[in-house]
C-alpha cells in the first residue's frame, strides 16, 4: 500500500524533535480585552487580573526563554486578551529583542490599535503582527467578535501595517459557522498584501464550547481546498493550519501520488515545521504564570513564579509523552503518519479527557483500517 511509504519519514523525526527547547513560546500577557469574541479561549475580561505577571516578572520570563540555551532562542508570541492593554508592552518587546528573542504580537482590533501604536510596535522591534479576521464582511466578523466596528478597524490596521512594512499574519477561526465564508475571506485577503493566512480549527474550550466544529468529512474537504491553494502559484501568501495537523498527511499523500520524494515534501508549505503540535515545539504561559502545553490544551504543569520554564518543558508530564509519537493511543497511535502529524492533542483532550487519544477531526485512520 503506497501509504506505508509514510513510515520512511520516521527517520527524519530527530531533525524535528523539540525535546530541549520549543520553537514557539506563547505568553498570554493579560486577559484584559475590550472585545467579546464568541470563541475566546481565554474568556477575556474588561479589567486585568490582579495576579497577572508584573513587569519585573515579565522580564524574568524573558530571561527564562533566553535560558533555553539554544543558539537561536524560541520565538516569543505575545498574546492575550489584548497585549495593547499592558502599559509595559513596548518596553518588554525591546527587552526581548535585546536578549536576541524574536517577538510577534497579536493585538485586538480596537480603537487602541492606531497607526501610532503600530509605529511603536515596529520601533520596539516586533518581527510580525497577527490580526484576526473571521468574516469577509462587517456583519459576519463583528458578530463573531461581539463588538461592532471591529471589521473596519481590522482592515484599516492591515493596511497601516502594510504601509509600515510590518510582516502580517491573519488568523481565522474555522467553525461550522465560518467554513462557508472562507473562500470569500481568501479573496479579500488576496487583495491586502498579507504574508500568511493561519486557519485555527476550533477546539471546544473557553467560550468556544458553544460553537460547532466541522465534521471529519467537512474538515477533509476543507483541507483539500487549502492544499490546492498552498500549491498554487497564484496564491499570494503562505497558508498554515493550527489544530488541524493532518493537513500534513493529506499534503504528503498528494505529493507522493505525483512521485515527489520525502525531501521535496519537507520543503513544501505543509512539510515545514513538521511534527510541531501542542507540547512539542510549543509551550504556553498564562497571564498569571501557569505553564501549559498550549493555549488550547489546559493541563497546568507548573508556574513560572515557582519553576524554571525549561525544566517544566523538558521533563514535566505530559510534555515528554506529547513529544513521543509512539505514546499516542487509538487510531492516532497506529497511524503511519503519526511522525509527521501526531494529531491535535488539544482536541483529543477536549473530547476524551486524554491528550494522547485520537484526534476526532481526522477521518484518515478510519479509511486506513478499513482497507
Image (tube, rainbow, N blue to C red):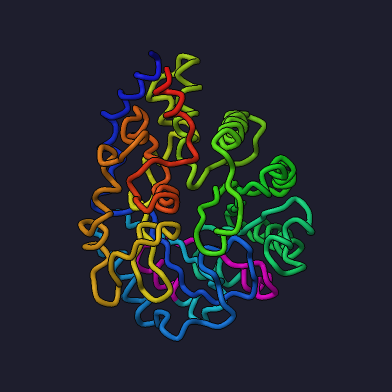
Reply above or below: 24 against 217: below
Residue 329 picture location, percent across and down: 31, 39
Residue lying at 59% horizontally and 60% vertically, measured from the top left = 39
Reply above or below: 34 against 271: below
Which quadrant holds residue 117?
Answer: bottom right
Residue lying at 53% horizontally and 72% vertically, measured from the top left = 83
* Residue 105 visible in the shown view: no
Residue lying at 38% horizontally and 45% vertically, measured from the top left = 276
Q: Is residue 65 left or right of 107 when viewed as pictured?
A: left
Which quadrant holds residue 190?
Answer: top right
Determine if the magenta segment contains residue 105.
Answer: yes
Residue 339 picture location, percent across and down: 33, 34
* Residue 26 visible in the shown view: yes
Q: Report the front residue among 152 and 128.
A: 152
Q: Report the front residue among 301 and 101.
A: 301
Query: Which range of residues does the magenta coloring cover?
Result: 92-118
Quadrant showing the C terminus: top left
Amino acid at each position: 500500500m503506497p501509504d506505508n511509504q509514510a513510515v520512511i519519514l520516521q527517520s527524519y523525526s530527530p531533525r524535528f524533535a523539540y525535546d530541549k527547547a520549543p520553537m514557539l513560546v506563547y505568553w498570554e500577557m493579560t486577559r484584559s480585552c475590550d472585545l467579546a469574541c464568541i470563541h475566546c479561549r481565554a474568556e477575556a475580561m474588561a479589567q486585568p487580573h490582579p495576579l497577572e505577571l508584573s513587569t519585573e516578572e515579565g522580564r524574568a520570563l524573558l530571561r527564562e526563554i533566553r535560558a533555553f540555551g539554544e543558539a537561536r532562542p524560541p520565538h516569543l508570541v505575545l498574546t492575550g486578551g489584548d497585549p495593547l492593554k499592558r502599559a509595559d508592552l513596548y518596553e518588554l518587546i525591546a527587552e526581548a529583542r535585546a536578549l536576541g528573542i524574536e517577538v510577534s504580537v497579536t493585538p485586538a482590533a480596537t480603537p487602541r490599535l492606531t497607526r501610532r501604536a503600530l509605529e511603536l510596535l515596529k520601533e520596539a522591534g516586533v518581527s510580525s503582527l497577527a490580526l484576526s479576521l473571521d468574516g469577509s464582511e462587517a456583519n459576519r466578523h463583528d458578530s463573531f467578535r461581539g463588538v461592532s466596528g471591529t471589521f473596519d478597524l481590522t482592515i484599516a490596521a492591515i493596511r497601516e501595517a502594510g504601509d509600515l512594512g510590518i510582516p502580517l499574519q491573519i488568523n481565522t477561526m474555522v467553525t461550522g459557522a465560518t467554513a462557508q465564508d472562507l473562500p470569500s475571506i481568501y479573496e479579500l485577503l488576496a487583495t491586502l498584501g498579507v504574508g500568511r493566512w493561519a486557519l485555527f480549527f476550533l477546539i471546544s474550550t473557553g467560550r468556544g464550547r458553544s460553537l460547532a466544529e466541522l465534521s471529519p468529512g467537512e474538515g477533509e474537504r476543507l483541507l483539500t481546498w487549502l492544499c490546492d491553494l498552498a500549491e498554487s502559484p497564484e496564491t499570494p501568501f503562505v497558508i498554515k493550519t493550527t489544530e488541524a495537523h493532518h493537513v500534513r498527511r493529506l499534503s504528503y499523500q498528494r505529493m507522493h501520488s505525483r512521485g515527489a520524494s520525502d525531501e521535496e515534501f519537507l520543503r513544501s508549505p505543509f512539510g515545514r515545521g513538521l511534527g510541531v503540535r501542542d507540547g512539542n515545539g510549543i509551550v504556553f504561559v498564562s497571564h498569571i504564570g501557569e505553564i501549559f502545553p498550549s493555549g488550547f490544551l489546559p493541563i497546568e504543569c507548573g508556574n513560572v513564579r515557582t519553576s524554571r520554564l525549561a525544566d517544566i518543558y523538558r521533563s514535566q508530564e505530559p510534555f515528554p509523552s506529547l513529544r513521543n509519537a509512539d505514546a499516542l493511543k487509538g487510531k492516532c497511535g497506529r497511524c503511519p503518519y503519526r511522525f509527521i502529524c501526531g494529531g491535535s492533542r488539544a482536541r483529543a483532550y477536549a473530547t476524551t479527557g486524554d491528550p494522547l487519544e485520537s484526534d476526532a477531526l481526522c477521518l484518515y485512520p478510519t479509511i486506513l483500517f478499513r482497507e
